Image (cartoon, rainbow, N blue to C red):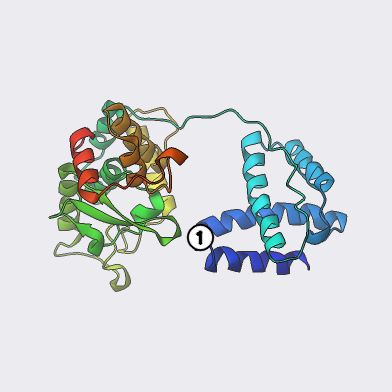
């Protein structure tokens, strides 16, 4: 089996059987493609790859300047690929089985203080056309702990403000309800009032999308990154922050305030916390009470 055939089949497996998002599939393919280029340079097809080949591949990644964290991520994607080849009886033995992952230290993500969150929002000029939108974006990321991909996909039909929740479609198209506080609701409502005003410019194909760009179309993840970076600069925040920084700050501030880690885990949309807590069930009302009690922007 050639590399193209094997990778195409694996992509279909990830899409149809694992229900991964296109972003996740693309990331896996990029990592596996690095191995493909290396192996084709040696004239080796996927079913004939050995552990020695993979060790040479990792050594080449090191020589190219990739850090251990990147090497480990690439190897993780490759492990999944070869497990799939075993599942499909393309190979009998997994060449990654005895391969050691590069040892990396745990690097904690940046966290913003509550004062920095407030400064980030205060730096936004609400007199500008995108002011209310940008404030609503930052507040929603922080108050609800959303991934940037979840934020840009948020629809008007996902907003259940009377009940105090928003519906979020997470990784693998898994749906969850996330409590939303009064500040985020107010910021979104102010933005929507402006967005839907007399001179509204909304592309009919994106009318149900909450956060739109100046042309009335869906925001991209890259646009949100740019907004966050720009606001951080205006606020004088020198940390290297991204939309995920707000998500991490959401979780950190809740836990620091005394929130149950299981509730935070469910609100973030993660599948498990620890093996001992995997069977714990949390109902939606408890989640709402947790965020309303412990989140500083309740």
- Residue at horizontal 12%, vertical 55%? 162
Q: Is residue 94 above or below residue 107?
A: below
Locate residue 283 relative to residue 153 in the image: left or right: left
Q: Nearer the viewer, residue 82 or 146?
A: 82
Q: Is residue 15 left or right of residue 234?
A: right
Farthest residue, direction right = 43
User: At numbered mark 1, what does the secondary structure look like: helix, strand or loop?
Assistant: loop
Q: Is the residue marked by circle 1 packed among few (<14), some (14-19), or many (20+) residues within 10 Å?
A: some
Residue reaching furthest bottom?
Answer: 204
Q: How many marks?
A: 1
Q: Position of residue 61 (x, y in %)?
A: 73, 41
The location of residue 294, given as percent across then percent down, is 22, 33
- Quadrant where the N terminus lies? bottom right
Q: Quadrant of the C terminus?
A: top left
Do we see residue 274 in this rendering?
Answer: no
Residue 247 placed where, x, y %?
36, 40
Q: Is residue 277 above or below residue 257?
A: below
Going 64% across and 46% down the picture, which residue do you hit? Answer: 76
Residue occupying image coordinates x 35% and y 44%: 280
Above or below: residue 287 compared with residue 260: below
Picture layout, residue 199 above or below residue 97:
below
Q: From the viewer's perspective, is 25 left or right of 87?
A: left
Q: Is residue 102 visible?
A: yes
Identify the residue at image location x=17%, y=49%: 185
Left or right, 42 with reference to 252: right
Q: Where residue 206 sits in the image (x, y, percent)? A: 31, 68
Q: Nearer the viewer, residue 39 or 179?
A: 179
Q: Which residue position is annotated with label 1?
A: 20
């Amino acid at each position: 089996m050639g590399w193209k055939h094997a990778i195409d089949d694996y992509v279909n497996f990830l899409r149809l059987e694992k229900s991964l998002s296109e972003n996740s599939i693309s990331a896996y393919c990029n990592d596996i493609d690095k191995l493909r280029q290396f192996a084709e340079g040696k004239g080796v097809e996927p079913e004939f790859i050995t552990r020695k080949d993979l060790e040479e591949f990792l050594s080449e990644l090191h020589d190219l300047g990739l850090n251990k964290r990147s090497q480990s991520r690439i190897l993780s994607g490759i492990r999944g690929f070869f497990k799939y080849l075993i599942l499909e009886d393309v190979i009998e033995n997994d060449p990654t089985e005895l391969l050691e992952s590069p040892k990396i230290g745990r690097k904690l993500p940046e966290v913003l203080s509550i004062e920095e969150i407030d400064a980030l929002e205060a730096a936004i000029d609400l007199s500008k056309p995108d002011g209310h939108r940008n404030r609503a974006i930052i507040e929603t990321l922080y108050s609800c702990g959303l991934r940037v991909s979840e934020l840009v996909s948020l629809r008007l039909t996902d907003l259940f403000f009377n009940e105090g929740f928003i519906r979020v479609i997470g990784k693998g198209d898994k749906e969850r309800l996330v409590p939303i506080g009064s500040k985020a609701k107010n910021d979104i409502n102010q933005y929507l009032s402006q967005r839907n005003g007399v001179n509204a410019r909304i592309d009919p194909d994106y009318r149900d999308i909450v956060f739109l760009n100046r042309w009335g179309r869906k925001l991209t993840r890259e646009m949100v990154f740019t907004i966050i970076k720009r606001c951080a600069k205006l606020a004088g925040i020198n940390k290297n922050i991204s939309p995920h920084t707000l998500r991490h700050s959401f979780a950190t501030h809740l836990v620091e305030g005394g929130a149950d880690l299981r509730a935070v885990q469910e609100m973030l949309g993660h599948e498990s916390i620890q093996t001992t807590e995997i069977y714990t069930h949390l109902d939606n009302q408890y989640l709402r009470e947790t965020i309303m009690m412990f989140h500083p922007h309740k």
